[in-house]
Amino acid sequence: MKNIVITFACILFLSGGCATMRPATDSEIFRDHESIATLDKQLTAAQGSEIDVLAPAGFARAKKLFDESLGLARKGKGSEAKRASNEGLNVLSNAEKEAEQVRDVMWEVLEYRARARKAGAPGLFKEEFKNVEGRLRDATRLVERDEVNAAKNRRPDLLKSYSNLEIKTLKEGTIAVAKASFERAKAQKSDDHAPKTFRRAEKELNLALSTLEEDPNQVEKANRHAELADKLSREAEQISELARIFDRREYSYEDIVLWHHEQLAEINKPLGGSLNFRQPHRMVVSSIKGKISSLRQAQKDDLGIVEKQQNRIRELDAQLDDVRKQYEGRLSTQAKKQAEKEHLEQEARQRFEYVQSLFTPEEAEVFRKGNNVLISAAGFFFPVGGTIILPQNFGLLNKIVNSIHQFPNSRVEVSGHTDSIGSTELNLRISRERADNVAKFLKEVGNIDPSRISAEGYGESKPVATNETEDGRTRNRRIDVLLINR
């Protein structure tokens, strides 16, 4: 009787334990089932290679087998899960082979498709592009079913559709932006307050439209007119906004001139000294230009100091090289590699620490990422919505130039970032223009080889802090300069 009770208690314990057993997570399944983890990775890679487009039936079958294997593994059916995942790997391998056949059959279609995507057709004509993509998948399914001739018969229609989308996007993309800017300026009655600029914008927009009407292939020429029309429309809108402010405040000519003096005085503040508005206007402007010229000369002097430091570094390198050669014969191969590694690491650390010492916490944070150096500068000052480099940023820019000269073989990636205030499109444009202007300063004032420098804007997409606080937004409004060392 005692044995029966004990046995019954064990059964209850085991059944209770099973009832409360936690199901395995995906990460645990991937750890314990190598074939499932491999299938997951290969499905992701296949999607990146567009196997889901080029061999849709095979890809869908492999994905279904992956989901089936996961479900079986969760139920503890390990052998069945392994069978399903191995079958999925075989199906995916066959799908990749079928995709290669599709690339051979549809290579020209795929080239035209790539051109339409590069032009921006998926974003500008989403539904139309989606429709053509569906027809492409229908054609690739025919190849999967060995109906190659039937797939080939669909090539002319697909070529024409993707080509039309590319041309349509190139025609309407830039011109659509210019039209929108012009209509905004028109709605703001810019033709009243800025008639010359407004008429120039209208003329350039009409030239863009007429160029395409006369010859649809003159897309590049039409886009140049459209870009200028967009620029002039925005300028007219800004002039109108300022003019309306003057109207609302009932400014007289005297008030406007005094306001202008205040702006010049504000610009002059970082340069030091005061402006004498009792002298002719051209003399005031000449005074500011003189201060800026002096600042640029000082910057050139700083570059001279940097060059001397670089020469000193090269001398030290030569001395270290001589010392290394003296002991080369005594060092083993492994010891030589270690010594070289330590030398390079010490040199890189010294240069990084020097760059780090240049900036105050308010100006920038400097990070080391392997051999690369990131200068994350939140200390730039731009007016709200503004992108022009102001004089008060010259000191920070000089330090960035100095830092770049410490790594003469580096590539320089300038990236602009904003907080989340304002529209995504506006923030993206502002960040791109700010990055472009900083890159232009580095090339033209910093005398850095333009081939080393690239610029990009990311808008609000890469925050480093929360946008819920002013401090966080300030940190997000930054220019990052990444020095990529070979």
Image: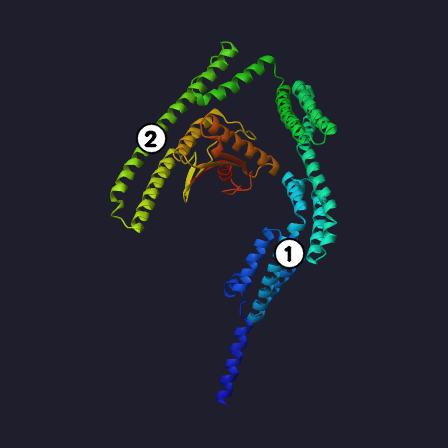
Structural crowding at the residue carrying mark 2, measured as other residues with C-alpha within 10 Å and reported as few (<14), some (14–19) or many (≥20): few
Q: Could you say which is closer to the camera, residue 57 or residue 204?
A: 57
- Measuring from the top left, give residue 384's x and y in whole percent: 55, 30
Which badge, 1 or 2, is on the more N-terminal residue? 1
Structural crowding at the residue carrying mark 1, measured as other residues with C-alpha within 10 Å and reported as few (<14), some (14–19) or many (≥20): many
Q: Could you say which is closer to the camera, residue 205 or residue 135?
A: 135
- Measuring from the top left, give residue 459's x and y in whole percent: 56, 38
- Measuring from the top left, give residue 68's x and y in whole percent: 62, 65
Amino acid type, mark 1: Glu
Quarter of the image where one finds residue 175 = top right
Give me the residue at 33% from left, 48% from top.
Answer: 337
Residue 368 lies left or right of residue 119; in this view the side is left
The answer for how far apart the CA atoms under marks 1 and 2 are is 59 Å
Amino acid type, mark 2: Asn
Instruction: Name the element at disc 2.
Output: helix
Residue carrying label 1: 98
Q: Could you say which is closer to the camera, residue 217 or residue 391?
A: 217
Q: Which mark is residue 311?
A: 2
Q: Could you say which is closer to the camera, residue 352 or residue 96?
A: 96
Give me the residue at 40% from left, 24% from top.
Answer: 300
The reply to whether residue 347 is in sight is yes
Quarter of the image where one finds residue 241 = top right
Q: Quadrant of the C terminus?
A: top left
Of circles 1 and 2, the one toward us is: 1
Residue 125 lies left or right of residue 462; in this view the side is right
The reply to whether residue 189 is in sight is no
